[in-house]
Amino acid sequence: MPFNFIREEAISQTREVVDKNLSRYQPLNYNRFMWWRTHTDNIKPLGKRALLKDRIINGDFNESSYFMQAQLALHQAKDKVNLNKHNHSDQLEILSVDLARYKRLMSDYDKEDNERLEALYEAFTSHFKITRNELIEELCNWSGDLLSYYEYCVQFKYETPFSVRKSKRGRPRKK
């Protein structure tokens, strides 16, 4: 079968879970330049100079919505075709748009997820005295959310001098 990606085993999330997760995001109108996207996170990331806690609360390091959109594309493709009834050429004709949508969404997800993880690693390693490998190991074993891990680090990790925010920037006062 050429389109095994829409079989039950390939779809990791149920339709109800996908719909519930996508209901948190803002639906997009059709855009001919980004036609494969159906929802947006609607999060404007804060700059690197913003406080780490504020960036976590803002959702700068949260998972993007592209994975759930890709799962929705799989469910829509599964609804369109009967794998036992349609032959290969009919499947290709029916599912070509869904296959392209799925590939582009997964590509966007991989790119966005890597960018957010790199920003997370950079933010934590510059704010606390912790190596990247230690951070990865602790985050993999952490049972809570990112904000609770931040609060743990504030209590038990050494903050770097650059992480302390100065009250004013600019030219020093004359004495």
Image: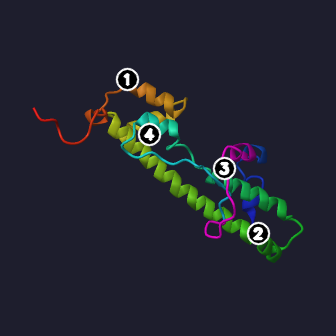
Which residue is tagged 2? 95
**Residue at the extreme right of the image, as rendered:** 85
Q: Position of residue 166 (x, y in %)?
A: 28, 34
How far apart, in angstroms, are the residues tagged by discs 2 and 4?
A: 39 Å
Q: Amino acid at mark 3?
A: Gln
Around disc 3, counting alpha carbons within 10 Å, would you say few (fewer than 14), some (14 to 19), or many (20 or more)? few
User: Which quarter of the rendered picture does the N terminus lie within?
Assistant: bottom right
The residue nearer to you, when weighing 162 against 129, is 162
Which residue is tagged 4? 136
Question: N-terminal of the two: label 2 or label 4?
Answer: 2
How far apart, in angstroms, are the residues tagged by discs 4 and 1?
A: 17 Å
Q: Is residue 98 toward the left or the right of residue 103 in the image?
A: right
Q: Is residue 133 toward the left or the right of residue 91 in the image?
A: left
Name above or below for residue 173 compared with residue 35.
Answer: above
Range of the magenta residues? 18-35
Q: Is residue 23 highlighted in magenta?
A: yes
User: Of the residues tagged 4 and 1, which is closer to the observer?
Assistant: 1
How far apart, in angstroms, are the residues tagged by discs 2 and 3?
A: 26 Å
Which residue is tagged 3? 26
Instruction: Specify whether residue 131 is in view.
Output: no
Residue 53, quarter of picture: top left
